[in-house]
Amino acid sequence: MLQQQVVFLQQQLRESNDRLGEANRKVDELLLEVAELRELLVQKKAEEQKRRNIIRGLSKIQQNKSEKQALPSASDTETASQAETKPRAKTNYGARRKEHYEVEVEEENVYPADPRFDEMRARLIDTHDVVRYVLVPMRFIKKVYHVHVYTQDGAVMEGKAPVAPLLGSNYDGSFIAGIAQLRYIYSMPVERIVKYFRENGFDMDKGTAHGLLRKTEAIFENLYKAMGLAVKEDDYLAGDETYHSVLVGQKNKDGKGIKKGYVWSVTAIHLGLVYYFYDDGSRSEKVILNYIGDYGGTFQSDGFSPYRKMAKRLTRLACLQHVKRKYLDCDGDEEAQGMVGLINELYQKDNRHVIGKDGWTAQENLRWRRKYAPAILKKIRMKLDQMAAAPDMLPKSDRYNAVHYMLNEWEAIENIFTRGDYHLDNNLVERLNRYISLSRRNSLFFGSHKGAQRAAMFYSLACSCRLNKINFFEYISDVINRTALMQPNTSIKEYRALLPDQWKAL
């Protein structure tokens, strides 16, 4: 009897083990199915994101007025027709006319053209002024100096013509400044500049224009070095990098000898100096880290990894606009839009006061920030942690990228509010980089790595002039003639005095 019970229990145990094994197998199958479904969901999210990006890009093109070609409606056509038939009133719509005191004035007396008019017999009853602004295209002047040589009391005396900044060249500094202004401020390709010159009466080869810029770079070599050193005198820097196509000897996978080269920029916020530099187009972290060296001030940037590494040696600030853009990319996500609202609240509070306006100081601004910022930052952090812990957030989604980008930048975000003069974002640098963006659109590429390096030097001077509200043409016209006369062993300190923040025209 006992043996039968043992056999029965053994059989029950085997059946239980079989059922447990079957259950485990089904669980494994279900887990595998869930994993496959999750992977499919991630892929679907990625495909949806690609479609949203395409739609977003098309929407931007549609919203861009320059891309639209709207057809006139019937009412518009009727209105235009009426405007053509009805004489337009001669009025300035009540606006005050600008006097333009800055332009050259020529005066001319205008007398009646009536054949009966006799100035001796006529009596003047009124004189009134009529103003017309006349545009004279770019003027080119060929100055010929007749240098006289005399002998007197056994000595030879000779007049001296102005020294040309470039050896063996007849071009004055103002001529070179004009080319540099059109190229680096107004983003005109050299080919277009020489065509513009030709249309205005001066025939110049493209090679000559390139040669003038190339020789000027050699004259400005020490001035450019001084710029790189002077920028790091400031205790508050901001940096970024942008790209430009560069012609190279080696062809890429598409069979074209073009490379995407990166230009780095560092701006001294207080001094108003900008240093652009280029290292064969490299975006490697060693380029920016080698330049920063042992600098111990404050650096503001986006979340690019080389910038984040600087936090080990200096105070780093984040860019709230870059953080905000990540959430703006989360189309239709209410949680993300809520975070955008909190970031906007920081801007709204901070914009109530402007340093320098109505005597508002950086110290007062710091006290204001200490008053409003902690509560808003606390709300942002709570919301950020809730979003990070949400079980429905898929990896590689827009929300995932936005949340983890902000988590990585959190300490740098808090650092913004530790001083009164720190900016909330890096927009100043991005606005300066638009000069390179315009060149990228108009010129398509730099002719070589050397050409990109030359552009970095000129953009450093041009953008620094803009920040210091100096006319770039006047600056280059003066500085090129002065640096050309400096001896090779002139100290960098003397060049430092010629940078836009300290420059004074002779």
Image (cartoon, rainbow, N blue to C red):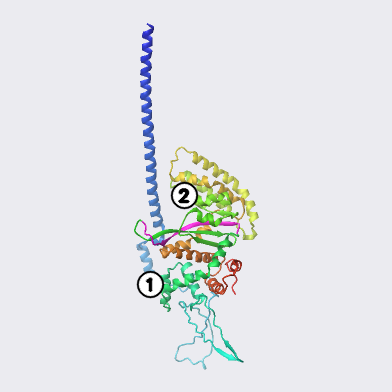
Q: Main secondary structure of the magenta part?
A: strand
Q: Is residue 502 magenta?
A: no
Q: Are marks 2 and 1 in contact (CB under 8 Å)?
A: no
Label 2, secondary structure: give it. helix
Is residue 454 at least partly visible in the picture? yes
Q: Position of residue 44 (x, y in %)?
A: 37, 43
Q: Position of residue 119 (x, y in %)?
A: 51, 92
Q: Name the residue tied to disc 1.
A: 85
- Callout 1, which amino acid? Thr
- Callout 2, which amino acid? Leu
Cα–Cα gap, marks 2 and 1: 49 Å
Front one among 323 and 91: 323
Query: Dot 2 surroundings within 10 Å: few (below 14), some, or many (20 or more)?
Result: some
Q: Is residue 71 above or below residue 206?
A: above
Looking at the image, the residue that sits furthest to the bottom is 120
Q: Position of residue 506 (x, y in %)?
A: 60, 75
Label 1, secondary structure: give it. helix
Q: Position of residue 65 (x, y in %)?
A: 41, 61
Give the left or right position of residue 422, taking residue 436 as reference: right
Q: Is residue 183 above or below residue 393?
A: below
Query: Dot 1 surroundings within 10 Å: few (below 14), some, or many (20 or more)?
Result: few
The range drawn in magenta is 234-252
Res. 328 mark: 2
Give the left or right position of residue 348, taking residue 33 as reference: right
Q: Is residue 160 above or below residue 459?
A: below
Instruction: Give me the residue at 54% from left, 62% from top.
Output: 274
Residue 12, quarter of the rendered image: top left
Residue 83, quarter of the rendered image: bottom left
Q: Which quadrant does the N terminus fall into?
A: top left
